Amino acid sequence: MAELSEAQQREFEAAAFRRLLQHLSERSDVQNIDMMNLAGFCRNCLSNWYRDAAAEAGVELSKDASREIVYGMPYAEWQAKHQREATDAQKAAFEASRPRDH
């Protein structure tokens, strides 16, 4: 494995995170429940993790602010534009594998 400085590692992790957000913004057809059912996390999880990291650094960030960072727009706007009602099958799959913190 390549030897990276701590600064390089942070820089590359940040770049990968920005690319993930870009990818998710381009794939608004992928619903959060699909992500939860397949991978065990979703856009809301990412926003929560972002807010947790801010809190660990002593920065207060609201739930709405962290969601806007991840969604690229206010959450309510994203929901209105992109969120569909989950099917019964999606809901059942979610309940069968629901993480404890959801």
Image: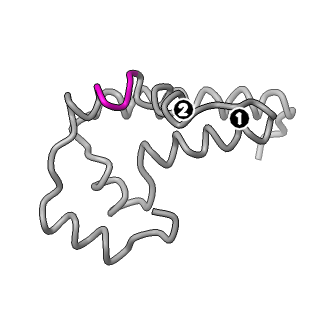
Could you tell whether 23 is left or right of 56 in the image? left
What colour scheme governs how the chains and residues are painted in the rendered image of this protein?
A: one colour
Query: Magenta segment, principal secondary structure?
Result: helix
Q: CA distance from mark 1 to mark 2?
A: 9 Å
Decide which of 62, 92 is in the foreground and name it.
Answer: 62
Query: Was residue 64 drawn as part of the magenta stretch in this picture?
Result: no
Residue 76 is one of the magenta-drawn residues: yes
> Does residue 79 sit above or below 1 in this rendering?
above
Q: Residue at x 75, y 30 (%)?
A: 59
Between residue 64 and residue 49, name the one nearer to us: 64
Which residue shows up at 13% across the image and 67% down it? Answer: 88
Residue 19 circle label: none
Q: Indicate left or right for 10 with 69 as reference.
A: right
Tell whether 17 sits left or right of 86: right
Q: Amino acid at mark 2?
A: Ser
Q: Are marks 1 and 2 in contact (CB under 8 Å)?
A: yes
**Between discs 1 and 2, the one toward the N terminus:** 1
- Give the x, y percent position of residue 98: 40, 70
- As rendered, which of 14 and 78 lies closer to the eye? 78
Quadrant for the C terminus in the image = bottom left
Residue 6 x/y as whole percent: 85, 34
Q: Which residue is mark 1?
A: 54
Residue at position x 20%, y 28% in the image? 81
The residue segment tinted magenta is 73-77
At mark 1, the secondary structure is helix
Q: Which mark is residue 66?
A: 2
Q: Position of residue 50 (x, y in %)?
A: 61, 38
